[in-house]
Image (spheres, rainbow, N blue to C red):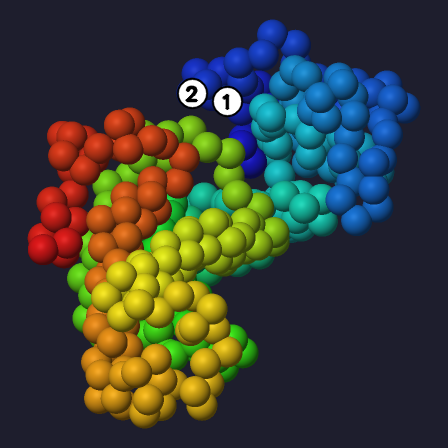
Amino acid sequence: MVTGDYHLTATAIAKQVGIFTAEGLHTVADLDQLSTKLEIVTEKEPRVVSNGKGRATGALLLTGTDLISLSEKQWDLVATYDEIVFARTTPEQKLSIVQEFQKRQCTVGVTGDGVNDAPALKAADIGIAMGSGSEVSIEAADMVLMDSNFSSIVVALESGRLVFDNLKKVILYLLPAGSWSELVPVLVNVFLGVPLPLSTFLMIAICVLTDILPSIAMMYEAPESDLLTRQPRNPRKDRLVNWKLLVQAYLCLGMMETFFSHLMFFFYMHQYGGFTPSDLLLAYDKWSDGYKGYTVDELNEFNWTGQSVLFVSLVVMQVFGNIFATRTRYLSLIQHSPIAKQSKNYYLFGAQV
């Protein structure tokens, strides 16, 4: 909490609203003693090791006068406290507090409603103004609480995390069939000489027909039960699309869909055309009139039907398998059932049909 009130008033308010819960209350004098125990782990991401867990224990109360004399090492320690109150601060000091925490790789959110809060609101990673606040604070903020109720921040936080989560789910759903499973048939045809396992028309059909409704339905997913209990993501590292998502999409889901859909293609060609895998591999120009005793029309008929088999296999795995594998990020299908009251999403079943 950052306020212009006296430190006694600020302490009483902090205890009343639950900001101060620790028994020990540290001041600037304690920082002088604790700063000698600091260990800077890295220069780029300074972290303080004071209690073996990288966080300082207790609560911290500082005044505007204290801030003037704080060293960089003491600021490193301040940034490790979970419960902090800054009292008797000026607008310039509020801005300085935001900048000091940002220098230590912290994501800073600031709430305020007055003119003197505007510099800090503008500099913060997210500035939150009250709807009943001054015009200056509203202009400087990134988000305005129209009902001037702090509990609305929790609603906004849940909505933001839900949108981010659902976007990741949609991307994870679309990548395996929408790119990987369409690229591999082309590579198999070009480099291994196998008759094209999936036609360009069917590739387009996957992208613009079969994948559209399920991906839209996934945007209506309800929040998972652990959504607000997760650790905040690091916006500098945890991107919407990261290497973990790509590994899951391509090397896990994509490889399984591609392997089994091609397996069905080769199975059909062997079962109904008598073509063994060795007959199809490196066929290239041999796939013409008279190959294995078939005419060109018959060979094309086998190939087109095989393409349909691969297409149907891919769509079934995508719409009835992948959609349930990607609709939850951390919970199981039982924990986040599409028919349960809290997590129901009947749009999924409509999209599947």
Query: Relative to 269, is 44 above or below?
Result: above
Mark 1 lies on residue: 19
The answer to whether residue 162 is seen in the rendering is: no
x, y percent for residue 299: 27, 82
In contact (CB < 8 Å): disc 2 and disc 1: yes
Of the pair 300 and 94, the residue shown nearer to us: 300
The answer to whether residue 338 is seen in the rendering is: yes
x, y percent for residue 329: 39, 40
Q: Is residue 146 left or right of residue 279?
A: left
**Local secondary structure at mark 2:** helix
x, y percent for residue 102: 66, 48
Q: Amino acid at mark 2?
A: Val
Within 10 angstroms of label 2, few (less than 14), some, or many (20 or more) residues?
Answer: few
Of the pair 300 and 28, the residue shown nearer to us: 300
Query: Relative to 151, is 191 above or below?
Result: below
- Residue at x 35%, y 73% (from the top left corner): 197
Mark 2 lies on residue: 17
